[in-house]
Amino acid sequence: MIKIENLNKFFKSFQALKDINLLVEKGELFAYLGPNGAGKTTTIKILTGLTKYSSGKVSLNGYDVKKEGLFAKEQCGVVPQSINLDQELTVFENLDIHGRLYKIPKKKRDFRINELLEYLEVADRKDSLAKQLSGGLKRRVMIARALVHSPRILFLDEPTVGLDAAIRKRIWAIIKRIQQDGATIFLTTHYIEEAEYLAQRVAFLNEGSIVENDTPKNLVDRMGAWAVDKVVDNQLKTSYYKKREDASAYTACQNTDCMLRRVNLEDSFLSLTGKKVK
Ligand SMILES: Nc1ncnc2c1ncn2[C@@H]1O[C@H](COP(=O)(O)OP(=O)(O)OP(=O)(O)O)[C@@H](O)[C@H]1O
Ligand SMILES: [Mg+2]
């Protein structure tokens, strides 16, 4: 369980997080979405003990991140936004160092690492240097590394950024499997369809404040069922309808090309954060 109460974070006079309150239940896959600079990574850094917060309270599985930092850290694994593997070490060595930091005995460590490399389908690259791997493989190795000490909570900060569609889907399957194995997952992504597919619940963060927190279905339903896109003065305008016949009637009386489609989570995201996604 992840609990955030009245969390504020200032960088000098700039307030990056404004009174954040969140509760992520045990075993839930929670997506934390927002435009560039909204404060997603800052939140993850605070939850994982990498950045201090200015005020509020945060805990992981009941352990206070400030007062019981070591216990809280043991609860979680983190896949950071930027690739931070040791490029001159092999895949195995990268995971092994992580296991040593958590003081896992050698026999248990070797077993766990080999098991994870199979799980993430990178076992055949065990002895490759990290720098020799493609972006997709590096992301998978980072996920494996975060799981070495069997954390109950996994933070994934844009785990599929820059990956092709096929590899992204493979990582989605891996994320689902990690959740099915009992972990709580806190995910950030700019691919809104990724959150719509994976998450039970979604929060939208905008300029440091949570503007919405609900299930993807409720967020989509609130927009309507059907959307009509049309380009007016080089700008995309979208209208929303509950009934398909109303959307079709609107489309029929337009003199520009229109596209009728189902409403999706990206519509909700754009209407609530008012910004374009990547
Ligand atoms: N160390 C720092 N010093 C000063 N300002 C910072 C620092 N780290 C982050 N910020 C600012 O805090 C805000 C939130 O940044 P953060 O990295 O959390 O955003 P994000 O939602 O993860 O964005 P992105 O989608 O681009 O990764 C931004 O305005 C950023 O410039
Ligand atoms: Mg970020």
Image (tube, rainbow, N blue to C red):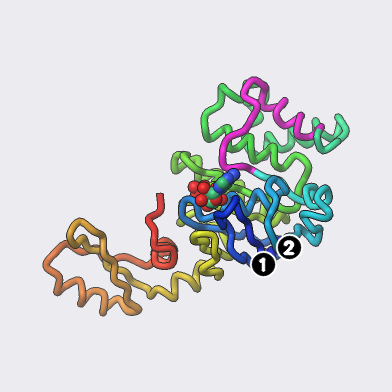
Report the span colored magenta: 79-100
- What label sits on residue 57 in the rendered view? 2
Q: Residue placed at 56% from the left, 22% from the top?
A: 132
Judged left or right of residue 223, residue 233 is: left
- Report which quarter residue 146 is drawn in: top right
Q: Residue placed at 81% from the left, 32% from the top?
A: 100
For the residues labelled 2 and 1, the Cα–Cα distance comes to: 7 Å
Place of residue 154 in the rendered image (x, y in percent of width and height, measured from the top left):
68, 50
Judged left or right of residue 76, residue 227 is: left
Q: Secondary structure at mark 1?
A: strand
Judged left or right of residue 118, residue 188 is: left
**Nearer to the camera, 184 or 12:** 12
Is 87 a magenta residue? yes
Cβ atoms under marks 2 and 1 closer than 8 Å: yes
Under mark 2, the amino acid is: Lys
- What label sits on residue 6 in the rendered view? 1
Q: Is residue 217 visible?
A: yes
| Residue 56 to residue 41: above or below | below
Mark 2 or mark 1: name the one nearer the start of the chain. Answer: 1
